[in-house]
Image: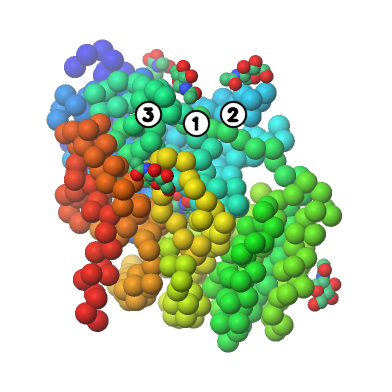
C-alpha cells in the first residue's frame, strides 16, 4: 500500500478485537436496535484527504463505500456488509462568511453545534429539530428543519457541495458545475452517488423573540382538536411552525395519560409580533385542555432540549411516516396512530407542511410532499418488546398508506416498506443519474431487504398499497 494509505486512520475487521470493532461499527448509531451487518473496515476520517484516500482504497479493493455523518439514520444505513465505512465523526469544519450569510460545514456537524456558533453572530440555520442529527444525512434527504412549512426545505438553502465522486475525485458541485451531482444532493438521501465532504449553506438572521403555545388535551378530544389544528394551520402566520403530537406529557406536569398536544412555535423579532402571531391559536382553541402554556417564552436551546427528551439516547426505535393525501379525512386516517400508542415513550406526530407543500420547488430530486406530514416514533427500552412495537407500526402503516401519496426518506426504512419518495419524473431521473454517476455501485445506496438494490435504486412505487389492496 502507498504511503497515503499508511497514514489513513483505518481499522480492519480481521485485525481488530471484537469489542473495538463493535464500537467502531455501531457505537455512533443512535438507535439501540442495532444491525448485525459487518463492514470490512472503518475509516475514522479527520479531513478531506482521508475521505479521498478511503474512496480510492475501496475502488482498488473492489468493495463498497458506506458513509456515516451523525449516525442518526433510524435504520442504521451507514452499517453495511463488507463495505469500507467512512465515519466522518472526527472531521470537523465550520467556516462562516459573516458578510455573505453563508457557512461551509463538514457533514457530521450537528444542528445544535452550527446554531451555537451562528447565535453569537445573530444568525441561524433552520436545521433538524433534534440537536444531534448530522447535517449530512439530514440535508441529503431534503431536511425538515425549523418552520419548514413556511421557510421551506433545509436543502433549499444549500448552494454548493464538495464531494468525492465514484472515481475518487474531489469535485465542487453547484447549479452550473457538476450540476447532476448537485441535483441529486438535494433529495437523494442515502442513495446519493458520491461522498459529500462539505456543504455550503445560506443562513438567516436569527429571530430575536420566540414564543410557544402548547395545549394538552385528553385523547377523548382527539377529533375536535385535530380538526381545529389542521384548519387553523392553513394560512397561519408565516413564521410559526405548527405540529400536533400524541404523547404522554413530561412527568413534571403530573398528567399520566397520553394527550393530544398541538404546539405552535413562532420565530419573530419582537415580543409584540410574536404575541400577535399566537393570538389566533389562543382565541380559537377548543375548550377542555388539561394543561396550557400560552405565549411561553422559549428559544432554540429549550426547543432542542425538549426534542432530546422526547428522543432519548439508549432506546430502541421504529420510525415510520407518510404524506397523507390532501383530500383525505386526516383525523379519521390518523385516529388509530394517535390513540393507541404502544408505550409511554412512543409518540405520533402530524406536522403542518402547507404552504410549502403547494409551492413550486427548485429543480432538484426532492419533490414529494402533501399538506400533512405524519410520522410514528415508537420508542421502547427492551428487546423483548421489539415484536409487539414493530407489529403496531406495521398494522398502522398498512392502513394509513392507502390514504397517502408517499413518504419522506428521513423517517423511512426500505427494508420494511418501499413506497414513493419522489414525484415520478424526479424519481426516474434520480435513478438514471445514479447509474450514470456511479455505474458500478461503489456507494452502497438504498438499504433494502438483503441490501440488493445497488445501482437499480428504489422503484419509487407504493408497493405495499398494491400488496394489501385486496384487504
Ligand atoms: C432523534 C431524531 C430526530 C430527527 N429529527 C429530524 C428532523 O427534525 N427533521 C428531519 O428532516 N429529519 C429528522 N431526523 C431524521 C434524520 O434527518 C435522518 O435520520 C438522517 O439520515 C440523519 O443524518 P445523520 O447524518 O445523523 O445520519 P447517518 O446515519 O450518519 O447518515 C445516514 C445516511 O445518509 C448518507 N450520508 C450521510 N452523510 C453522507 C455524506 N457525507 N456523503 C454521502 N452520504 C451521506 C449515508 O447513506 C448514511 O448512511 C431525525 C432522526 C432522529 C434519530
Ligand atoms: C489529513 O490528516 C493527515 C494525518 O492523518 C495528514 O497527514 C494530512 O496532511 C491531512 N490532510 C489535510 C489536507 O489536512
Ligand atoms: C461576500 O461579501 C463581500 C463583502 O460584502 C463581497 O465583496 C463578496 O463579493 C461576497 N462574496 C460572495 C461569494 O458573494
Ligand atoms: C459554481 O462553482 C464554480 C466554481 O467555484 C463557480 O465559478 C461558479 O460561479 C459557481 N456557479 C454558481 C451558480 O454559483
Ligand atoms: C387566551 O385566551 C383566554 C380566553 O380563553 C384569555 O383569558 C387569555 O387572556 C388569553 N391569553 C392571552 C395571552 O392572550
Ligand atoms: C422535479 O420536480 C420539480 C417540482 O417539484 C419540477 O419542477 C422539476 O422539473 C422536476 N425535475 C425533474 C427532472 O423531474
* Ligand 5 in which quarter: bottom right
Mark closer to the observer (3, 2) = 3
The answer to whether residue 232 shows anywhere in this view is yes
Q: Residues within 10 Å of mark 1 (few under 14, many from 20)?
A: some
- State the residue position of label 1: 159
Closer-to-camera residue (282/96)? 282
Do callouts 3 and 1 mark residues in contact (Cβ within 8 Å)? no
Left or right: residue 455 versus residue 300 is left
Q: Position of residue 240 (x, y in %)?
A: 67, 56
Q: Is mark 1 within 8 Å of ligand 4?
A: yes
Q: Position of residue 177 (x, y in %)?
A: 39, 23
Quarter containing the N terminus: top left
Which residue appears at 60% of the width and 82% of the height? 224
- State the residue position of label 2: 102
- State the residue position of label 3: 179
Q: Earlier in the sequence, mark 2 or mark 1?
A: 2
Do callouts 3 and 2 mark residues in contact (Cβ within 8 Å)? no
Mark closer to the observer (2, 1) = 1
Q: What is the C-alpha distance between the residues marked 3 and 2?
A: 20 Å
Secondary structure type for disc 2: strand
Amino acid at each position: 500500500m502507498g504511503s497515503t494509505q499508511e497514514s489513513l486512520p483505518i481499522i480492519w475487521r480481521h485485525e481488530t478485537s471484537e469489542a473495538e470493532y463493535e464500537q467502531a461499527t455501531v457505537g455512533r448509531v443512535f438507535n439501540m436496535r442495532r444491525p448485525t451487518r459487518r463492514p470490512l473496515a472503518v475509516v475514522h476520517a479527520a479531513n478531506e484527504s482521508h475521505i479521498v484516500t478511503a474512496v480510492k482504497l475501496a475502488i482498488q479493493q473492489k468493495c463498497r463505500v458506506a458513509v456515516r455523518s451523525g449516525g442518526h439514520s433510524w435504520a442504521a444505513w451507514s452499517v453495511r456488509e463488507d463495505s469500507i465505512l467512512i465515519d466522518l465523526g472526527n472531521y470537523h469544519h465550520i467556516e462562516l462568511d459573516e458578510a455573505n450569510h453563508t457557512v461551509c460545514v463538514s457533514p457530521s456537524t450537528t444542528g445544535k453545534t452550527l446554531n451555537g456558533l451562528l447565535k453569537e453572530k445573530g444568525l441561524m440555520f433552520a436545521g433538524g429539530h433534534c440537536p444531534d442529527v448530522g447535517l449530512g444525512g439530514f440535508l441529503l434527504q431534503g431536511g425538515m428543519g425549523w418552520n419548514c412549512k413556511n421557510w421551506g426545505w433545509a436543502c433549499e438553502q444549500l448552494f454548493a457541495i464538495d464531494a468525492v465522486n465514484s472515481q475518487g475525485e474531489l469535485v465542487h458541485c453547484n447549479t452550473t458545475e457538476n450540476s447532476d451531482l448537485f441535483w441529486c444532493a438535494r433529495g437523494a438521501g442515502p442513495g446519493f452517488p458520491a461522498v459529500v465532504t462539505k456543504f455550503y449553506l445560506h443562513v438567516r438572521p436569527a429571530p430575536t423573540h420566540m414564543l410557544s403555545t402548547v395545549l394538552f388535551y385528553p385523547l377523548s378530544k382527539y377529533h375536535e382538536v385535530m380538526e381545529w389544528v389542521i384548519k387553523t394551520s392553513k394560512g397561519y402566520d408565516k413564521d410559526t411552525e405548527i405540529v400536533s403530537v400524541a404523547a404522554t406529557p413530561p412527568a413534571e406536569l403530573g398528567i399520566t395519560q397520553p394527550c393530544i398536544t398541538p404546539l405552535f412555535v413562532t420565530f419573530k423579532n419582537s415580543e409584540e409580533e410574536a404575541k400577535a402571531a399566537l393570538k389566533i391559536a389562543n382565541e380559537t382553541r377548543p375548550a377542555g385542555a388539561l394543561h396550557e402554556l400560552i405565549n411561553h417564552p422559549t428559544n432554540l436551546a429549550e426547543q432542542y432540549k425538549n426534542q432530546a427528551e422526547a428522543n432519548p439516547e439508549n432506546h430502541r426505535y421504529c420510525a415510520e411516516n407518510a404524506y397523507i393525501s390532501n383530500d383525505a379525512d386526516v383525523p379519521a386516517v390518523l385516529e388509530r396512530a394517535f390513540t393507541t400508542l404502544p408505550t409511554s415513550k412512543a409518540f405520533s406526530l402530524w406536522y403542518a407542511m402547507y404552504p410549502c407543500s403547494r409551492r413550486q420547488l427548485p429543480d432538484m430530486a426532492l419533490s414529494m410532499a402533501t399538506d400533512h406530514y405524519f410520522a410514528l416514533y415508537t420508542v421502547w427500552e427492551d428487546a423483548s418488546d421489539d415484536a409487539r412495537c414493530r407489529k403496531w407500526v406495521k398494522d398502522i402503516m398498512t392502513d394509513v398508506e392507502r390514504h397517502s401519496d408517499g413518504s419522506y426518506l428521513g423517517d423511512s426504512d426500505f427494508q420494511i416498506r418501499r413506497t414513493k419518495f419522489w414525484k415520478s419524473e424526479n424519481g426516474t431521473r434520480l435513478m438514471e443519474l445514479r447509474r450514470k454517476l456511479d455505474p458500478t455501485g461503489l456507494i452502497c445506496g438504498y438499504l433494502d431487504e438483503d441490501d440488493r438494490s445497488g445501482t437499480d435504486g428504489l422503484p419509487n412505487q407504493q408497493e405495499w398499497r398494491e400488496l394489501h389492496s385486496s384487504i
